[in-house]
Image (cartoon, rainbow, N blue to C red):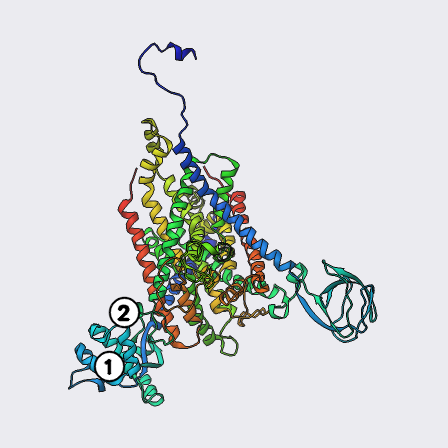
Amino acid sequence: MNQPAADFDQNLPRRRRSGRIWRLVFQVSTIVGILVLTALLYNILNQSFGLAAVEYAIPPESLAVEGVPLEELSGEALQVILRANASAGLVRALESEKPLAERSRDELYELVMDRVAEPQVVKTWSLVDSLLHRRDLEREAAEKYPAARLQSFSWINRSFIQRPQAADPLRAGVRTALLGSLWTVGITVLFAFPVGVGAAIYLEEYAGDSRLNRLIQTNINNLAGVPSIIYGMLGLAIFVRALEPLTSGALLGYVEDPTQANGRTILSAGLTLGLLVLPLIIINAQEAIRAVPNLLRQASYGLGATQWQTVWSHVLPNAIPGILTGTILAISRAIGETAPLVVVGASTYITFDPDGPFSKFTALPIQIYQWTARPQAEFRNLAAAAILVLLALLLAMNVSAILLRNRYRRQY
Amino acid sequence: MAVVTAVPSGPRLALRRRPRVREAFIQGFLFLCGALSILTTVGIVYELGKESLAFFTTQLWENSNKPLAQDLTPDDTIMQVGSEGAALHAEDLIQVHDEIMRVVSIEGSSIAIERGLQGTVPQTHAAGIQILRSNRVTLREFFTHTKWSPQIGDFGILPLVNATLLTSLIAMLVALPLGLGVAIYLSEYASARARSILKPILEVLAGVPTVVYGYFALTFMTPLLRTILGRDVVEIYNTGSAGIVIGILILPLVTSMSEDALNAVPRSLREGAYALGGTRLETAIKVVVPAAFSGIAAACIVAISRAFGETMVVAIAAGAGPALTFNPFQGAETMTGHIVRISGGDLSYDSIDYNSIFAIGLLLFLITLGLNIVSQRVVRRFREVYE
């Protein structure tokens, strides 16, 4: 009688021990997950800031006038410096672009820094290296780059966001890419939101249990699992190639020179991303519509409303917070997508702002990809800074989605 | 009818159903929105299929460097060829000048031929002219050859598939144990408070764009591997670090799907196990995980499909250039990486490069679609239904 109980007691410490060990294992995997996220952020921040050895054609100090440092000079003084030091041709070009007298002080300061001081990064160090080994780095820089000055450098700054792409890392910025991304996503929303919500309404409110409707539902679930690059190829074949007259704008008489136009435009990219996020929007909107209690529908029908009246004035107003939340999340997916845009043919080196759906474009993730793929360290720094811009954009969208959800949450 | 006539007086109520044009129109539009998803699928299958078909049927002519040894008159059915150049085989399609012929049989230097094929006309050909051999990509070559170099007409997809399998395998080795561990911890061990903090943190990982992971692989994981294992062992571009980072990328997917499955297991099962004297671990491993098996299996399959289709990480970190290698520390281009590299350049329509990436895309689409369908089947087939 006592034997099994004795066995039980004997095994208990062992079972407890393995319980503790495995608990530790599970905990460790969770910690690893969090560590990875930390490493990811650390890596990006580490590359976005740090020390840089910068060489100047003319050091900014020597441009000081009567002891007033360059940063504090007035616009007129800066104009004088610019005319005195820059070549005549450059001054003429700048004048014809916008007369110097009409430019603001900040613009002039930038011009003097860029065109007169002409800073050039010869070497960069990451943030952590800069903080921990500053003295060693200073010695190394003094030996290897005697002409250069070591200075703290933030790759992400105001001019980085305001400037277009450029070949020189110090002058490169993300404005064109950011605008390209926003234009593209704008087209995506215009296309995918109405169609996605329409499909969700159809599936939840109208569709009976027919074979066709089941097929549509299964099909949407499957489309959500198709790799994004496949959508890129679909976009290349259909929007860029087959519908070229439409997507290049030639059909609408939008381009001056039809021989130069091709379908690799913002419109094609936006529609491609639209197809990509459509299943996500539909699935999210379906859930939101399903969460609207049936009581509301029945009450509406009871008052003699038609089906569309019920949907439009009762179901949709109650489901719209959920639909919007889902849509914002889908859109933030679209902003980060890179592969389909590469396949559809985002151009990589574009220095002018996109001016409409038919213009050639680049996008933020494309810019990151391009800079990452370059071997020089400075471009890696630029990529890190661009990633920070992208992540900030995504963070803003996600926060707004959460706020929206909390603001309009209703309980039945 | 009798009822209607029984109404004596007053305004007439039309209770019959009236056609509502506007409602029908709206319903039609909504149906079209739903049907667009079908059109998308049809579009994918049609476009990938069409271009792939072109890829397998386009005739490329490659110079065999074999010259005609004697003049050929329009009536000849035997031709004499020189000994140099690549060997011809029976059933080969050949082109001499602009006439297409088929090799019927070969005896030494004399070759029996069928003349004037594919609408070409038998002509006189002078000795010395070089024979072109048809090099159509066959399905067999596509799936069995071990070299992919479109410039010289080698279209064996194995190196690309191999690299995809390698990165996906490494990814799964990272994501499965970690993801399951996290899921079990969150659903069985963590307090409600810990969960409410940990879950959103892990969800942040899911929201990071893949190009950022690519950057992470190249600037963090690869240097890390190179520091640990040595610079001569690990190349700058390697499938290993790409695979590990893809594993990290699909970790949130495995975690959240598995955790949902574990949470769906009713409390009564756990309480039953505790009542029988099970420890927390035994309850989790022997009762809850088996009960949630269908969901966990589905999570794994979906994760594999994600890993197959993952593009930017491999495009950035795994290397450019197809290579058949099982060494995870060497560079090798995957299917997706190849598509991105080829289409990133100046791609002209209907070139063999253009068609070839669609053939790769079709294969990728079929694999991932198959995996997704299997995962849905698994959920349906093995789901344990309680209550």
Question: Disc 1 is attached to a residue of which chain?
Answer: A
Q: Mark 1 vs mark 2: tell me if same chain.
A: yes
Question: Disc 2 is attached to a residue of which chain?
Answer: A
The answer to which of A92 and B279 lies nearer the viewer is: A92
Q: Is residue A405 left or right of residue B113?
A: left
The mark that comes first in sequence, 1 or 2, is: 1
| x, y percent for residue A282 | 42, 46
Judging from the image, what secondary structure is the residue with disc 1 in? Answer: helix
Query: Is residue A2 at least partly visible in the picture?
Result: no
Query: Is residue B325 at least partly visible in the picture?
Result: yes
Residue at 42 percent across and 40 percent down: it is: B30
Judging from the image, what secondary structure is the residue with disc 2 in? Answer: helix
Q: Quadrant of residue B367?
A: bottom right
| x, y percent for residue A144 | 36, 88
Q: Which mark is residue A158?
A: 2
Residues packed near mark 1 inside 10 Å, few (<14), some (14 to 19) or many (20 plus):
many
Q: Marks 1/2: CA distance?
A: 22 Å
Residue type, mark 2 in image: Arg
| x, y percent for residue B19 | 41, 27
Which tag is nearer the camera, tag 1 or tag 2? 1
Residue type, mark 1 in image: Leu
Residues packed near mark 2 inside 10 Å, few (<14), some (14 to 19) or many (20 plus):
few
Q: Quadrant of residue B117?
A: bottom right
The C terminus of chain B: image quadrant: top left
Residue at 63 percent across and 65 percent down: it is: B156
| x, y percent for residue A174 | 34, 67
The N terminus of chain B: image quadrant: top left
Residue corresponding to mark 1: A82
